[in-house]
Image (spheres, rainbow, N blue to C red):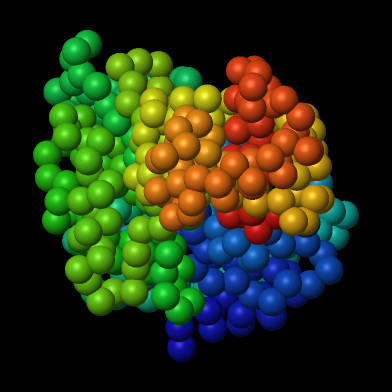
Amino acid sequence: MGLQDVVEDLASRLGRSVALNDYDLSLIAASAQDSGVDEYRVQSILTRRTPVPIIRLLHDGGYLDRTDPFVLEGGQLPGLQPRLCVPVAVKGRTVAFVWIVLRDGDGELSPADYTTVRRATEEITGMIGAASPNPVAERVVEGSRLLQRLILTDTVVAGYAVTELVEDWHLDDRSTLTVTVFDMEVDGEAGVSELKNLAGPAFAVLGGPSLLASVDGTYVLVTARSDALTLGERIDRGFAGTSAGVRVRASGSSSTTEWRSGLRAAYMEASYATRLAGRVPEVPKHARFADLGSLVLFRGLPWRRSSVDLICPEVLALAQAGEVNVASLLTYLREGGDVPQTCEALRIHRSTLYYRLDRCREFIGDALDNGWRRSSLYLGLVLAELLAAEGR
């Protein structure tokens, strides 16, 4: 009998949906859901992790520091139903949470139900406590505790976490912290909880004052190392040399000297760089936010076709033209209008390039001859590429 069996049995006895999360709120096990659940429960099942609004609510409210069972009242977020939470502690440290969705108006659990919950929680505690200790996984769990307080909470909670970090790493006003967010791919059906056990290749190259954790389905690395901006590539090579079925799709990083006010801004910048990383030639697989240039303008835009039209309406005309070679036009723009370099990159004759550009001019007018329109055309084409890379 495993954790999934215990969760299913508890749900059956209570007649309510039940889930088991680890400390960083990644889903370990979940019962079949009935109609009496909200969108947050559905999203957590589909993504295998707790939705970010719930994570922030739990951290900001100090709920994850509680050791006794508590009810997360409904209505604190739009459509949120109340939940009973029972923390699971092993050797005095909270390692997981049992969540039971309550339905509005159906009353509290009966004394018999609470006894059932207590016994199931004791069984879960025994199973987790009996599991073979994994030093790497333990280190990731500890990192998750601190890192989520640093980047997902309000300034008060984050302030306490920064104080803890300063003491552990001996930081001063000259220190620079770098945040790197990794987009990971796992073969098969391995989830985030199993990813933690595969963090060895990352720790093999980290060393020094570094913090690696699982946050919202990604690996997040915070380090004060001077070579932090090269760690993404080195960790990528570390995973490539294993047979664990894990690889790094991309990574993004951002550095800050304003770590005393929290690392959330750097985390958001690194996350955005990760979103762009490797999707277009302008952005390498391991990207730095500071090197994104004008692509940071897309950060405040919804990534939709209407956004492309807003930047440059001619891009839509090109897309609808059919016989126009847009790739040649984009290469020409990337090469700064250098004809020989464009021909070399495309492996075509100069006359062929001129023909293709002339065909494009039928739809873009004098955009190539006007600096402002030329830059807008280029950005619009790049955003269209990013949308295509995301399957839109």
- Can residue 168 be seen here? The reply is no
Residue found 81% across the figure and 50% down from its top: 320
In this picture, residue 63 sits left or right of residue 71: left
**Residue extending furthest toward the right:** 105
Q: In this view, does 162 lie above or below 107?
A: above
Quarter of the C terminus within the rendering: bottom right
**Residue extending furthest toward the top:** 173
Residue 102 pos. (x, y %): 75, 58
In this picture, residue 300 sits left or right of residue 266: right
Front-lying residue, 313 or 213: 313
- Snapshot quadrant of residue 126: bottom left
Front-lying residue, 371 or 109: 371
Residue found 81% across the figure and 42% down from its top: 317
- Snapshot quadrant of residue 260: top left
Front-lying residue, 179 or 76: 179
Q: Is residue 333 above or below residue 38?
A: above
Residue 96 pos. (x, y %): 44, 59
Residue found 27% across the figure and 56% down from its top: 236
Residue 61 pos. (x, y %): 57, 33
Residue 315 pos. (x, y %): 73, 39
